[in-house]
């Protein structure tokens, strides 16, 4: 198992060195996301609580203007393995939102402050409203964005090996798209679509309807971290990764116990097998 | 082996039960005293592994159904609900989804082992054919299961596969409408797939029981392909096979759980995290990895109907494998040419899988067509011919002779002058 992993890592490393250049050159295609190291990667990966809290702030103050996160509840922010905000903080955050509820006893819908059990309030009542307000483009729901988008694209003959080690690059994709706005090359600029920006990291790109969302100091971090575009992009990518699978930490720590248990069991079974078969020719 | 039973209960309760319903006797004869060839290698442990995988899929599936909602508006969110809110739901869902892949990994190894050692030959034809039936039921079950999370690939995979039936002359359109329960893949389709996905595993259990029954009538094959001739050749199922199977299962589960816990999405498609949308077609519609070789065969044929026939034919051909192989010798260990053909078939099957994963354009089409022709040529031309032309190596006179000869050749190296 260990040698296999080392072998795979070696293959992945070797091929990515070779392909680092060729993949980026692949003409007109989506650029590979920049591969950075997140704290939640690997067998013992954990989320950085402070980073998740910063990422949530970026989502709340910037992304949430257009993007919903329909599968998330405020209570999730206080749960183990996430930003782990205190109960009071979660209550206060939820109460900032206005939630439509009802019907009441008179049959009327009414509005009330949010509760921890409420889902994140969506910026638009429905998809049509969201599209109408965004020039016909739908601001995708962000709950599963790091799961459904792939940042890494490699030729078929190496892709399975690299992705086994590196994953699909969903978190890296989010980060790279947020940082990836650039001036279009001269030949592409000629037929630039109205109101769109150039972003070669965007999956359906290179033209993207979302204007560059982050600018220097767009948010003010409570922990004093400097809010550079890269910092915010990295933080919100981590936050969205957690939101994509809030139970990731539990999964990984349980997995370690399971695999360790099976490894010991296998050893014992192997010794038992040797003993049982002992002198029986086979 | 259907010898007379050696079960002799000492416990009065067991004796009482055995006199009225010989269930303890059946279990004892099948899983304790059942004689197995003493030379079985680890490739023969996959039958037991498959049994456990089947049980594992059924148990996790039953629990998942307690939280899943088979409705187009709620299915996707209900799977996310399982991952997010159900106790241990995140692991349970991944165990089931990755479990399907490992069920197929095990079954492919099991089938390949059968082909290598000629396990399909007389008197085990029915045993083999039941195995092919099991594989078909597994494929149908796996396909329908993949539709249930109602992601983009679920939806479009269902659409592409069900649309295959429109190739049937005259009744094609009617059959597809009937399968869908409407005029497109919609709620009626999802609900019937859910119903069948719950039903088919129990059909599977039924066929597996027949498969094991047939196995216990003919007795297990073995790597030499020489039938069991005396008690010298066999060893009791318990403890010998039991402990060996348990060890192999445990190692298999290390790999399986490593994927469940550390690469749960690796064998799936990212785009299935996007809810099904009938208005947006994904760029590449690809089935799950375990269908890829057959998908490649489907696409290798330019004509739709013939493509469908080739795809189903590529599995149906296994049903007549016992009669296509003309050699009297079972095991590839004693068939030098067949052994090479076997490995060529494995390579060919792997190539078909790679072709199936890639878009049907450029030289992929040519490669797919060559690999498809070779696949059928292996079964229809090479296999019958090589059985007649090949000179097999001399067979050992018995299993125990083969084992003793093997051990004797090992001995001097293992024990230096002492």
Image (spheres, helix red, strand yellow):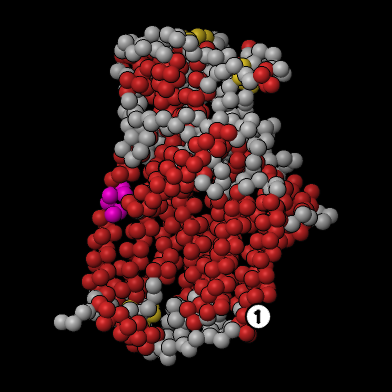
Residue A259 in view of the camera: yes
Residue B10 in view of the camera: no
Determine whether the residue tagged by mark 1 lies in a helix, strand or loop. helix
Q: Specify the quadrant of the image occupied by residue B385.
A: bottom right
Q: Is residue B348 above or below residue B282?
A: below
Q: Does B158 lie within the magenta span?
A: no
Q: Which residue is found at the position 34% from the left and 13% from the top?
A: A225
Q: Is residue A183 above or below residue B56?
A: above
Foreground pick, A106 / B130: B130
Prevailing SS of the magenta stretch: helix
Instruction: Give the residue at mark 1.
Output: B385
Residue B135: x and y in percent read 56, 62
Q: Residues within 10 Å of mark 1 (few under 14, many from 20)?
A: some
Find the magenta span and give its range: A258-263
- Image quarter where the C terminus of chain B lies is bottom left
Q: Is residue B299 left or right of residue B203?
A: right
Residue A254: x and y in percent read 31, 42
Residue B103: x and y in percent read 48, 56
In the current view of this chain or complex, which residue is farthest to the left?
B418
Q: Which residue is found at the position 65% from the left and 69% from the top?
A: B317
Q: Is residue B345 above or below residue A162?
A: below
Foreground pick, B247 / B71: B247
């Amino acid at each position: 198992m260990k040698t296999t992993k080392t072998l795979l890592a070696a293959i992945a490393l070797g091929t990515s060195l070779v392909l680092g250049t060729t993949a980026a050159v692949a003409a007109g295609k989506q650029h590979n996301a920049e591969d950075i190291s997140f704290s939640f990667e690997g067998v013992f990966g954990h989320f950085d609580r402070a980073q998740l809290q910063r990422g949530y702030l970026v989502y709340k103050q910037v992304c949430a203007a257009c993007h919903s996160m329909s599968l998330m509840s405020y209570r999730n922010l206080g749960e183990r393995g996430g930003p782990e905000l205190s109960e009071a903080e979660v209550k206060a955050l939820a109460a900032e939102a206005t939630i439509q509820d009802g019907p009441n006893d008179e049959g009327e819908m009414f509005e009330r402050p949010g509760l921890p059990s409420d889902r994140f309030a969506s910026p638009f009542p429905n998809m049509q409203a969201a599209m109408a307000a965004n020039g016909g483009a739908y601001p995708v729901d962000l709950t599963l964005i790091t799961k459904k988008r792939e940042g890494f694209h490699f030729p078929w003959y190496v892709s399975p090996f690299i992705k086994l080690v590196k994953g699909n690059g969903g978190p890296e994709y989010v980060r790279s798209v947020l940082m990836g706005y650039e001036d279009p090359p001269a030949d592409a600029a000629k037929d630039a679509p109205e109101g769109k920006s150039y972003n070669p990291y965007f999956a359906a790109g290179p033209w993207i309807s979302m204007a560059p969302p982050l600018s220097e100091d767009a948010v003010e971090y409570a922990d004093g971290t400097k809010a550079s575009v890269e910092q915010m992009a990295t933080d919100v990518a981590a936050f969205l990764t957690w939101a994509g699978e809030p139970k990731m930490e539990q999964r990984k720590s349980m997995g370690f116990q399971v695999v360790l248990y099976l490894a010991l069991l296998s050893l014992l079974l192997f010794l038992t097998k040797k003993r049982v078969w002992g002198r029986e020719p086979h | 082996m259907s010898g007379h039973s050696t079960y002799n209960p000492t416990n009065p309760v067991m004796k009482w039960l055995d006199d009225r319903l010989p269930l303890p006797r059946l279990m004892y004869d099948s899983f304790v005293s059942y004689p197995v060839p003493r030379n079985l290698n680890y490739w023969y442990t996959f039958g037991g592994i498959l049994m456990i995988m089947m049980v594992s899929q059924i148990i996790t599936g039953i629990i998942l159904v307690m939280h899943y909602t088979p409705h187009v508006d709620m299915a996707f969110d209900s799977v996310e609900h399982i991952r997010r809110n159900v106790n241990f739901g995140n692991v349970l869902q991944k165990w089931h989804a990755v479990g399907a892949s490992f069920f197929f990994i095990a079954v492919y190894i099991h089938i390949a082992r059968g082909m290598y050692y000629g396990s399909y030959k007389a008197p085990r034809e029915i045993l083999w054919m039941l195995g092919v039936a099991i594989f078909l039921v597994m494929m149908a079950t796996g396909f329908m299961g993949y539709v249930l999370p109602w992601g983009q690939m679920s939806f479009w995979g269902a659409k592409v596969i069900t649309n295959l039936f429109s190739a049937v002359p005259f009744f094609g359109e009617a059959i597809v409408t009937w399968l869908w329960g409407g005029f497109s893949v919609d709620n009626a389709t999802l609900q019937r797939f859910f119903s069948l996905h719950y039903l088919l595993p129990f059909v599977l259990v039924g066929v597996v029981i027949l498969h094991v029954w047939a196995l216990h009538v003919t007795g297990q094959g073995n790597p030499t392909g020489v039938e069991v001739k005396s008690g010298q050749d066999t060893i009791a199922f318990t403890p010998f096979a039991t402990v060996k199977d348990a060890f192999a299962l445990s190692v298999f589960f290390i790999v399986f759980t490593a994927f469940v816990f550390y690469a749960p999405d690796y064998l799936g498609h990212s785009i299935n995290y996007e809810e099904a949308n009938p208005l947006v077609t994904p760029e590449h519609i690809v089935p799950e990895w375990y269908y890829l070789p057959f998908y490649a065969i489907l696409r290798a044929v330019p004509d739709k109907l013939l493509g469908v026939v080739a795809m189903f034919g590529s599995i149906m051909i296994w049903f007549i494998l016992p009669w296509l192989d003309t050699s009297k010798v079972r095991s590839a260990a004693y068939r030098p040419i067949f052994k090479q053909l076997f490995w060529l078939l494995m390579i060919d099957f792997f190539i078909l899988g790679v072709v199936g994963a890639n878009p049907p354009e450029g030289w992929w089409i040519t490669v797919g067509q060559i690999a498809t022709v070779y696949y059928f040529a292996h079964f229809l031309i090479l296999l019958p011919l090589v059985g007649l032309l090949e000179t097999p190596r001399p067979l050992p006179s018995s299993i125990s002779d083969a084992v003793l000869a093997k051990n004797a050749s090992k001995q001097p190296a293992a024990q230096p002058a002492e």
